[in-house]
């Protein structure tokens, strides 16, 4: 994948989908022919049903969004009105944005009916800008979606021309001349500002460009001047892509789509070797790897695997990807074949080669990390967990579960270290919630002499305590303080008990078993 360098002028492709709701509806309910009634989409606005979207036939008959349904039926009695479904429209737009990832990883949403692609350095892969644009429009048309697209040097210029102009490709530096005849509405201004400009005799972008910017900003606001400068190609603020740009991308395009599992695995292995070579030159390793499969019908399937430490060994990553593919409930369906496979590395870290220790601990740590990676790839990161320390004195909040493959975060609390040759102060097995027991103890604050737990009596041979631990007052202000004891019964089993409350209070104290020592 070519880098988006700063030396060449940036180029943007704006895509407008003027009839997205109608196209989505007709994908589900195919048209029967040219005699189908006009299609409109309605939504209740201020207790009245109004049109929020129309198809091409309804638009040609003078039905525009904002019109009430009653007025629309008075003009066109035989129209077909259906409820608007913005969530489904947004889902279709998201799928189309996914399909556009085949052209560039920099794809941004443009409202509810458009997309903007930063195609700098990518057009030569498709035979030039005009060919890339034609390929995109053709793929959308094959999916039953009408699209209009324009390529220009800034997102605002491309967007204005796609929605209000006729040009397909604007040569670098020609934005000002191309957008001059467009109405001021093409700048994306609100209706109130457009009306004020119209009353002042400023109806086109060219009219605004001919005026000094200072009076325009004073009368209509700085936003108007900023949008004007961007539409004229004099300022570029770039786009915010919908997906973060990976640190490393490699891909392979196929003249003939592939669908056999062996061919797909071989292509992935080749891409992983290329990615490993790139990471090695940078002195980095990957912490996450994503394989993207682009079908000829526009569908995209992605598989992500993560590692507990930086990795760049191709065989290791391929093993994780295969584990992930085998664990999928919905296998990868190539359909009519994949014409593009991409491997990206969203997260990288400096890669250091650890020296093997004489006691073999480094080897054991590497084997454990590899096991965690394989389990995570097969079962998912949310099902392979580890305990991490939390900065809290409350035993019930002193630990939390995090994905086992996740590295320790900056500022993460450290586990308390026991003194050399000293017994542990906290048990390995903690009950949640603590289990009530019946205890016999000296009054008022003596350790338990014996206790009954699960219908079995334990006589205490040794005890240590009390260790008073209060609740976090901002979380449980009414919880009484607890006096904890580490006790050992006559058979050598060790327990962690506490007394909740104090003798002499309104409520007598109760005893609980909170954990077991190994």
Image (cartoon, grey):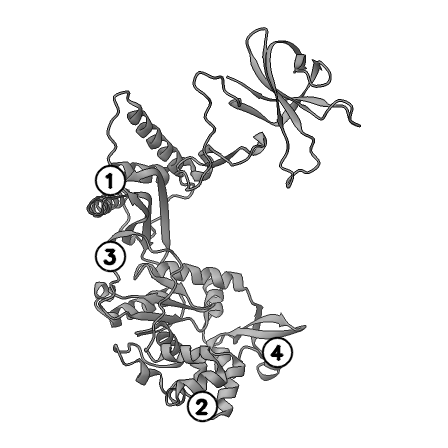
Q: Where's the N terminus, which quadrant?
A: bottom left
- State the CA–CA distance, disc 3 to disc 4: 49 Å
Q: Which mark is residue 68?
A: 4
Residue drawn at 24 percent across, 27 percent down: 356
Query: Pointer 1: what residue?
Result: 314
Q: Give the label, 2 or 1, closer to the camera.
A: 2
The quadrant where residue 398 appears = top right
Q: Earlier in the sequence, mark 1 or mark 4?
A: 4
Where residue 407 sits: x, y (%)?
Answer: 39, 38
**Disc 4 element:** loop
Residue drawn at 44 percent across, 86 percent down: 216
Regarding residue 455, the answer to whether it shows in the image is no
Q: Give the label, 3 or 4, closer to the camera.
A: 3
Query: Pointer 2: what residue?
Result: 202
Q: Earlier in the sequence, mark 3 or mark 4?
A: 3
Where residue 164 sits: x, y (%)?
Answer: 40, 81
Q: Which mark is residue 95?
A: none
**In the picture shown, does residue 450 fall above or below 45?**
above
Regarding residue 72, the answer to whether it shows in the image is yes
In front here: 28 or 261? 261
In front here: 487 or 138? 487
In front here: 369 or 413? 413
**Disc 1 element:** helix
**Disc 3 element:** loop
Q: Earlier in the sequence, mark 4 or mark 2?
A: 4
Residue drawn at 30 percent across, 74 percent down: 153
Q: Give the label, 1 or 4, closer to the camera.
A: 1
């Amino acid at each position: 994948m070519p880098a988006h360098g700063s030396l060449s002028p940036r180029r943007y492709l704006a895509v407008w989908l003027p009839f997205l709701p109608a196209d989505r509806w007709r994908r589900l309910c195919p048209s029967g022919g040219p005699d189908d009634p006009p299609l409109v989409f309605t939504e209740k606005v201020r207790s009245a049903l109004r049109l929020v979207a129309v198809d091409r036939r309804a638009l040609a008959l003078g039905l525009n969004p904002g019109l009430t349904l009653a007025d629309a039926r008075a003009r066109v009695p035989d129209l077909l009105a259906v409820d608007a479904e913005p969530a489904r429209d947004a889902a279709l737009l998201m799928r189309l944005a996914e399909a556009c990832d085949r052209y560039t990883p920099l794809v941004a949403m443009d409202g509810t009916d458009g997309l903007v692609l930063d195609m700098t350095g990518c057009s030569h892969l498709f035979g030039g800008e005009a060919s890339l644009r034609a390929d995109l429009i053709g793929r959308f048309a094959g999916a039953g979606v009408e699209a209009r697209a324009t390529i220009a040097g800034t997102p605002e210029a491309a967007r204005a021309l796609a929605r209000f102009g006729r040009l397909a490709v604007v040569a670098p530096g020609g934005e000002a001349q191309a957008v001059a005849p467009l109405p001021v509405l093409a700048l994306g201004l609100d209706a109130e500002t457009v009306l004020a400009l119209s009353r002042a005799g400023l109806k086109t972008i060219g009219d605004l460009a001919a005026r000094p910017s200072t009076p325009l900003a004073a009368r209509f606001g700085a936003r108007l001047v900023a949008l004007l400068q961007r539409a004229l190609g004099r300022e570029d603020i770039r786009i915010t892509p919908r997906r973060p740009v990976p640190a490393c991308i490699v891909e392979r395009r196929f003249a003939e789509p592939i669908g056999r599992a062996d061919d797909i695995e071989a292509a992935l292995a080749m891409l992983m070797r290329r990615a490993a070579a790139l990471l090695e030159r940078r002195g980095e390793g990957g912490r996450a790897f994503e394989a993207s499969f682009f079908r000829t019908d526009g569908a995209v399937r992605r598989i992500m695997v993560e590692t507990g430490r930086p990795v760049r060994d191709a065989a290791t990553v391929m093993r994780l990807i295969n584990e992930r593919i085998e664990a999928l409930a919905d296998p990868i369906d190539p359909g009519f074949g994949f014409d593009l496979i991409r491997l990206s590395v969203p997260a990288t870290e400096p890669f250091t080669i650890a020296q093997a220790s004489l006691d073999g601990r480094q080897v054991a740590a590497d084997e454990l990390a590899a096991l965690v990676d394989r389990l995570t790839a097969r079962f998912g990161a949310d099902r392979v967990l580890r305990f991490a320390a939390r900065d809290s004195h409350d035993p019930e909040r002193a630990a939390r579960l995090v994905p086992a493959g996740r590295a320790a975060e900056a500022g993460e609390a450290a586990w308390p270290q026991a003194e050399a040759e000293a017994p542990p102060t906290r048990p390995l097995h903690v009950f949640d919630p603590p289990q009530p027991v019946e205890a016999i103890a000296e009054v008022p604050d003596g350790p338990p002499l014996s206790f009954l737990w699960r219908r079995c009596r334990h006589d205490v041979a040794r005890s240590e305590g009390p260790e008073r631990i209060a609740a976090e007052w901002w979380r449980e202000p009414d919880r009484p303080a607890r006096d904890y004891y580490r006790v050992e019964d006559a058979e050598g089993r060790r327990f962690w008990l506490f007394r909740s409350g104090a003798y002499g209070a309104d409520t007598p104290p109760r005893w609980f078993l909170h954990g077991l020592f190994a």
